[in-house]
Image (spheres, rainbow, N blue to C red):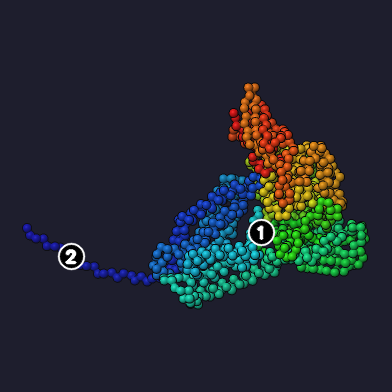
Amino acid sequence: GKARMPAPAAPAAAPRALPRIEPRFGRATRWAQCRHIFAFDAAAVFKSVPFLVMLLFGVLNMVGSASQMDRMFGTDVYPMTHLMIDMMEGSFNFMLLIIVTFYAGELIFKERQARIADVVDAMPTPNWAPLVAKSLALVGVVLAFLFTGVLAAIAIQLVRGGAPVELALYAKGMLVSSVPFILLGLIAIVLQVVTNNKFAGYALMIVLMVSQVVALVMHFDHNLYNIGGLPRTPYSDMNGYGHFLAGWAWFALYWTLFTVAALIVAQAFWVRGLSVDWRTRVRTAGQRLKGPSGVALAACGIAFAGVGAWILHNTNTLARYEAGNVAMDKQAEYEKTYRKYKDLPHAKIVDVRANVDIYPEERRVAIRGRYVLENKTGQPLDTLRLQRNPDVATTLSGLPAHKVELDDRKFGFTIIKLDQALAPGARLPLDFAVDVRRPGFTNGGTADTINLNGTFFNNREFFPQIGYQPGGELTDRNERRKRGLGEPERMAKLEDKAARANTMFGQDADWIDFETVVSTSGDQVALAPGYLQKSWKENGRNYFQYRMDQKMMPFFAYLSADWAVKKGEWKGIPIEIYHDRKHAYNVDRMIAGTQKSLDYFTTRFTPYQHKQVRILEFPNYQSFAQSFANTIPFSESIGFIADLRDKDAIDYVFYVTAHEMAHQWWGHQVTAANVQGSSMLIESLSQYSALMVMEKEYGRQQMRRFLRYELDRYLSSRGGELIEELPLVRVENQAYIHYRKGSLVFYRLRDEIGEEALNRALKRFLQDKGYQESPFATSAELVDYIRAEAPPSKQALITDLFEKIVFYDNRVLEASAKKRSDGQWDVTMKLHLAKTEADGKGKENPRAYDEPVEVGVFARARGAKEADEKVLLLEKRALSGANPVLTVTVKEQPFEVGVDPYNKMIDRVSRDNRKEVSIE
């Protein structure tokens, strides 16, 4: 065939001209580069094993801490959001220090470690882009870490229930918590860049953190020179963040400006390509700072200085900041200058009238008052020595003709010479005006008594006092030694008759008449001891007049807040609980505790002297309750948010209420002389009284658990004694003795001599010593009343309990049981019994075990709780030998035996007092 000719090719298309692409290196490109570097670096950190391990460890630590959060006597609190934030900070803070230090180095040297630094440095990116991106990545790491903590906290809240989840508060708390770590992280990045050596950067960061701790120890504690230092921002459900955020915000701005300036310097030192020597880097950095960077650095420097000056004015000039050592120097100077006046005779306050105006929104208080002073000394007095609070403006007036011999404004000490001496038994008026202001903000975010919502102060804080005040003395032995002072003054001896002229409440006054008018803002209620005579509104403010209908101790308080009120009553006596609206959880328990206390105390002791009871919540900046005449301020953290849903939980709300009610007898009917043992009369008797009310409400099983906590606290606190442990009758305001040991001693005494006998002694003591004038009651007198009600066989025990320091070592070594043919059980137990006596320094000597000890046998179903046990036998036995063997017979199968099973004795190891029985 014919060859086929190829088809003619189509003509080639003319080549198309491609558009010319011009590289853009403008602002948008640079920020896009920055954004991509940030995303890449942040993702790398989030996926890294160290970050995930530390995050997991922090979350596990947080979950573990949740079970112990703010516990008292083993009882939980509701998981309020602010408590969860505090717990998150406590669980995460150390981890975050490690993270910002470690990842600052990892981020800066990431490309070099991957050996791609030369390629990256050749990219057309400005020096600031990778620095800003890595800085933002570290910020993101901190926020992500805390955000995970917030999610864990919310999960815990939802699981436990009972408390609202406050998302806005979590956001604020996360911001406040993150700022110090962000600042430290950015400083760590600066150190990494400037040193250009990862390990040198780490070393400098460690040196920085250690130096900050050392500086605080050496009293260099101003946040102006503590890099990243910020004041505290305590949170209260009543008061929110209150006034604390203002100071925190200024310090945060101050250190943010410093950090931005440091980052500007760091970008000037940013290394690209091969490393060069330090001198070349400094010269290059100087050149880089000549343009816009230099302008920005100068602007930051000027703003930093300006903000610093403003902070200095507020903290040092307005808020009168003092370093810790300066404050101690002043205390020492006060003592050296004025202690010579301590024991000189002086007039006493017998009547107080005061108009108190509280301005919560301004954090200001204006006081106009009048004292009536009486000469109770038996000799003419021509000199008045007055102590004013030097931090507030106080003016004195109304005195008869006189001359001011001394007006020391530094210490607030004034000496006035009367033209005509005050005769014995004569009286004179003293008018005063006090202007309390809180200008500026503090360096440390110190909690204050005047708040936007929840003001609570007592007369000792602002009202003038009479004579030298030993409470202003320096108490730390080492600090006293440094300043040429002797040992701290101890309390007057129990035998000091002259010291019995004053009460433990101070030397200003004994019993006083009291009336006050107190005003506050239009949305708050103001309260003080006494009975409301009238209330009115004037110029948008609320006014209240209170008057006490009988004499009271010279110890009174003023409170102002926006409360909800829950009311109850006892035999016609009104009971009112003023509480924050979020904290209604336990107000019924407080009312019940008040009612049961009134039942017990009025039946066993003496009548209640007042016509009302008021419990008033105040912010959690301090954690205590305090009993004034018919008025009991109660911290929001000591009962209002206790979680009592577990029926086996120790109801410390009920206990604290009963304790503070008991002070209406022990402290406000009988008051103690200012000698050794005074706090036994006031605090130990209140402990005993509350224990009796609790036992009537909850039974012996809960008392055993409660007393075990008291015993453990007493024993653990002994090691912290700085001077000398004293017997209970001579206690010198040592809390671990008058609270913890006091509970144990009086509970055991009740068991040994009987509740009726002990209460008879206390009733007679109240009847004889109630409202007594000078000389005031002592603990030795109380012991005499107790001895009078106790049989001869208990006198040695009373000596051991009150006048000696005695310990026991009781243990169950072995326990077995065998069923008899008649269906009963023979229970054999081998015990260990020992008794020692200690001196004030802790040296112990053995004592003969010369007293009966309680032994018990208990039945319990397998898996049941101790609260469900049944007592098969409980009796006192006199046993001989250090390791006696005892056999008893019971009617049911035993589960457990015990020696001193309810922990009434002061036993070093209470948990070995019981042992499960082995069945033969």
Q: Is residue 853 visible?
A: yes
Between 342 and 517, the one nearer to me in the picture:
342
Between 97 and 428, the one nearer to me in the picture:
97
Residue matched to label 2 = 9
Badge 2 element:
loop
**Residue 429, x across and y down, in percent:** 87, 61
Picture residue at 82% right of the left edge, 61% below the top: 342
Residue matched to label 1 = 242
Q: Quadrant of the N terminus?
A: bottom left
Picture residue at 67% right of the left edge, 30% below the top: 887
Picture residue at 76% right of the left edge, 62% below the top: 486
Q: Is residue 475 above or below residue 590?
A: below
Quadrant in which residue 4 is drawn:
bottom left
Badge 2: residue crowd in 10 Å (few <14, some 14–19, many ≥20): few
**Residue 391, x across and y down, in percent:** 75, 65
Badge 1: residue crowd in 10 Å (few <14, some 14–19, many ≥20): some
User: Which mark is drawn over residue 288?
Assistant: none
Q: Is residue 498 above or below residue 223?
A: above
Badge 1 element:
loop
Judged left or right of residue 906, residue 300 is left
Cα–Cα span, label 1 and label 2: 89 Å
Picture residue at 62% right of the left edge, 70% below the top: 308
Judged left or right of residue 213, residue 331 is right
Q: Is residue 242 above or below residue 602?
A: below
Would you say the residues marked 1 and 2 are in contact, meaning their CB atoms lie under 8 Å apart?
no
Kind of residue sitting beneath label 2: Ala
**Residue 738, x across and y down, in percent:** 74, 48
Between 846 and 704, the one nearer to me in the picture:
846
| Tag nearer the camera, 1 or 2 | 1
Kind of residue sitting beneath label 1: Gly
**Of pointers 1 and 2, the one earlier in the residue sequence:** 2
